[in-house]
């Protein structure tokens, strides 16, 4: 079974530029998550989708971050404009469903973003 | 408040020796606990989880974890460490926060296994 796919793997941009990340979840997984992992910290949830609807975006900095999951499969996370503090690894994860606490999330390899 | 603590930034162990990576949690209601491992430039890989039942949970790559409700702990263990086990390990708890079902991660513990 194919895992969660993400691209690009690495991205270097200057502050105030825009950037977009792409995620393709495991086939059949209804729930998709975007996490931000700053160096030396654990991942922190940015946004969660159930099919193509947003379930939780309470931690998403909406003045600069946006995400969409058209057709309930692939998802794109965008930052515009980027700040220095956005330098981090952006992880995408998916799970079969969110309604059960025991559901396991499976993570992609991540996109490492460096903002100069 | 719902939280996870990994008290050790780094654990050093000799190859062949047993290893323990510590995790304690604070959550209202029943805890749903997870361990993930992260190798350099890789995403998080699921190791094991505790939902209910037997306090000793067995997972991937020979790892196991012991759930202790009285001590609110979920320590990760392996009887005999390998150099290839060297990686960053994250403990996580699934908890309701603000009406949402979130996965809360600890800060991570770096495991270094020396030959």
Image (cartoon, coloured by chain):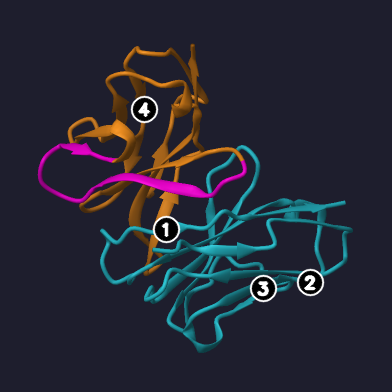
The residue at 58%/41% (across/down) is: A41
Crowdedness of circle 3 by 10 Å Cα count: few (<14), some, many (20+)? few
Q: Which chain is orange?
A: B
Query: Alpha-carbon distance for marks 3 and 1?
Result: 25 Å
Q: Confirm whether residue B63 shows in the render.
A: no
- Is residue A63 visible in the rendered image? The answer is yes
Helix, strand, or loop for circle 1?
Answer: strand
- According to the picture, the residue beneath numbered tag 3 turns out to be A62
Nearest to N terminus: mark 3 or mark 2: 3
Task: Write the start and end of the magenta stretch as one range.
Answer: B41-59
Residue A8: quarter of image: bottom right
Which residue position is annotated with label 1?
A106
* Front disc: 1 or 2: 1
Q: Where is residue A108 shown, x and y percent of the image?
A: 52, 58
- Total labels: the figure holds 4
User: Alpha carbon of mark 1 to alpha carbon of mark 2: how far?
Assistant: 27 Å
Q: Position of residue A96 (x, y in %)?
A: 33, 70
* C-beta proximity under 8 Å, tags 3 and 4: no
Spot occupied by residue A33 in the image (x, y as percentages of width and height): 49, 66
Q: Residues within 10 Å of mark 4 (few under 14, many from 20)?
A: many
Give the structural element (helix, strand or loop) at label 4. loop
**Residue B100, which numbered label?**
none
The residues tagged by marks 3 and 4 sit, at their Cα atoms, a distance apart of: 35 Å
Q: Which residue matches tag 4? A: B22
Return the disc, 1 or 2, that comes first in the chain's sequence. 2
Q: CA distance from mark 3 to mark 2?
A: 10 Å
Give the camera-side residue of B84 and B64: B84
Q: Chain of mark 1?
A: A
- Disc 2 and disc 4 on one polypeptide chain: no
Q: Which mark is residue A80?
A: 2
Marks 3 & 4 on one chain = no
């Amino acid at each position: 079974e194919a895992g969660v796919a993400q691209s690009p793997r690495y991205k270097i941009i200057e502050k105030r530029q825009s950037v977009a990340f792409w995620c393709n979840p495991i086939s059949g997984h209804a729930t998709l998550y975007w996490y931000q992992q700053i160096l030396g910290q654990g991942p922190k949830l940015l946004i969660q989708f159930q099919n193509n609807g947003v379930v939780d975006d309470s931690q998403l900095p909406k003045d600069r971050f946006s995400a969409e999951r058209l057709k309930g499969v692939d998802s794109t996370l965008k930052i515009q404009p980027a700040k220095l503090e956005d330098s981090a690894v952006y992880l995408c994860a998916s799970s079969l469903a969110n309604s059960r606490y025991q559901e396991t999330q499976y993570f992609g390899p991540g996109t490492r973003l460096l903002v100069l | 408040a719902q939280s996870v603590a990994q008290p050790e930034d780094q654990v050093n162990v000799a190859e062949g020796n047993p290893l323990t990576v510590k995790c304690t949690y604070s959550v209202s209601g029943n805890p749903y606990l997870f361990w993930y491992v992260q190798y350099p430039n890789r995403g998080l890989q699921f190791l094991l989880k505790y939902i209910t039942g037997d306090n000793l949970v067995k997972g991937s790559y020979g790892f196991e974890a012991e759930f202790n409700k009285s001590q609110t702990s979920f320590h990760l263990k392996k009887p005999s460490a390998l150099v290839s086990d060297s990686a960053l390990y994250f403990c996580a708890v699934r908890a309701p926060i603000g009406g949402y079902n979130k996965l809360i991660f600890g800060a991570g513990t770096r495991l270094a296994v020396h030959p």
